[in-house]
Image (tube, rainbow, N blue to C red):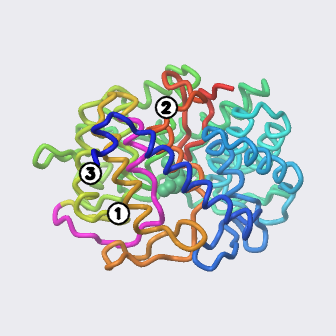
Amino acid sequence: SVPASAQGNWKPVADAVREEFLWAWRHYVDRAFGADHIKPISGGGEDFFVEGHSVGLSVVEAVDTLWLMEADAEVERAVQWIIDNLDFNIDAPFQVFETNIRMVGGLAAAYHCTGDPRLLERAKDVADRLLPAFTQSPAGLPYRYVNLATGQVSDPETNIVEIGTYIAEFGVLSEWTGDSRYYDLAKRAMRVAYDQRTEIGLLPHDINAETGQWRNREATIGPPGDSYYEYLWDGYRLFGDPELKQWYDTLTGAILSKQAERRDGMLWFPQVDAFTGEVLSREQSVLAGFYAGLLAESGRVAEGRAYHDAFNLVQDEFGVIPTFVDYSTMKATRVDNALRPEFADSALMLWLATGDEVFRERAHTHFKNMVATSKAKYGFASLADVTAAPPSQEDTCPGYWWSEQMKYYWLLFSDTPRLDYRDNYLSTEANLLRGARR
Ligand SMILES: O=C1NC[C@H](CO)[C@@H](O)[C@@H]1O
Ligand SMILES: [Ca+2]
């Protein structure tokens, strides 16, 4: 039959995405409801943040996706679980960065979609429990862990992602509660890193939360550098802060001139020494794929296209993009892939920026290959080896699967009336913080 795209009719693909999501959701509800993760091969549940202390991560990550898919009875079930069970008074250290993008962001998105003030209360509650990580730090850079019950902080050996990926979630909390503390603490941490950019305008990625001193020399747009840059632009996009735009433009100018490498019309971003610009590694993390979308969103459309072209070459080569590929050899240097969503993330951003059908085609391939390789008895499984025939699965499904790629596919193919396609914002965890149309 004629492929959906040739008909210009993506509805069958949108229906397939929704069907797969609800199939996986029903198994999660039946077998692991309230667990952070389902184990999709055995049907069990597992904790993500702290052993023995699940906080319903997959429920919180799924709410806005269910809402956008108009699965309103399931939204109701998820919200009821949160109201009845979610209590953050847990005497254990939680990772500040992961708790913010997943739990603060997930609850904020659930509030944005449903308007239920009890969800905003819980987003504020868990954010307030993260604040000691910021306020206890002499340099204003958050420690990596905080005990949600006692406020005890730990681990200053951090990186620019974990000190710099808060302004979207903290910023909407400030906007929605009228308390500017959240925004101010998030921005202050970003400023510390920016003010220490090197003479060639690049940032190393590791930093000490107590002294503010750099802990390494390597610069990367992949982890653990990626969402620091993403949130500079996002803070400007969401709140119009011209200083954040100026920091983003300055650093992006340096990255494009000192950290980009062109090969056969494609663009790559090697790891380089932040002080000298010397190339240290040509390995590309699958997570770096988000950067193609960020470049396009922030007006560097040609560069965004060229970087997505590069990752599309990798997708064509491997079917599912390996966690690390060395682009000088096109060999996988890490063969697993934990259901990583970044290629689909940037496909959506590039489609929104250009309207070019090629990005829907690429995301369609990403979806088909995911179903073909990750589908297991009770849900979708991370892959241990994408180069094996067939690719081997792991008995785990990451929380971001419920928030990210299934939402990206749905928004790409469904033309849902529940999203303002012209003015919206998805966080780095794809939490919808602007653009829900109730
Ligand atoms: O920013 C992020 N980094 C890692 C995960 C997806 O790979 C997810 O938590 C989020 O997209
Ligand atoms: Ca992300």
- For the magenta stretch, what is the residue range? 328-350
For label 2, the residue is 415
For label 3, the residue is 312
Depth check, front residue: 244 or 359 = 359
In the figure, 374 relative to 76: above or below? below
- x, y (%) of residue 279? 22, 56
For label 1, the residue is 320
Residue positioned most to the left: 264
In the figure, 390 relative to 139: above or below? below
Of callouts 3 and 2, the N-terminal one: 3
The residue at the point 38 percent across, 50 percent down is 343
Which quadrant of the rendered structure holds the C terminus? top right
Of callouts 3 and 1, the N-terminal one: 3
The residue at the point 28 percent across, 58 percent down is 315
Left or right placement of residue 390 versus residue 371 in this view: left
Left or right placement of residue 314 versus residue 213 in this view: left
The residue at the point 26 percent across, 51 percent down is 312
- x, y (%) of residue 183? 67, 31
- x, y (%) of residue 68? 61, 38
The residue at the point 23 percent across, 37 percent down is 257
Depth check, front residue: 209 or 281 = 281
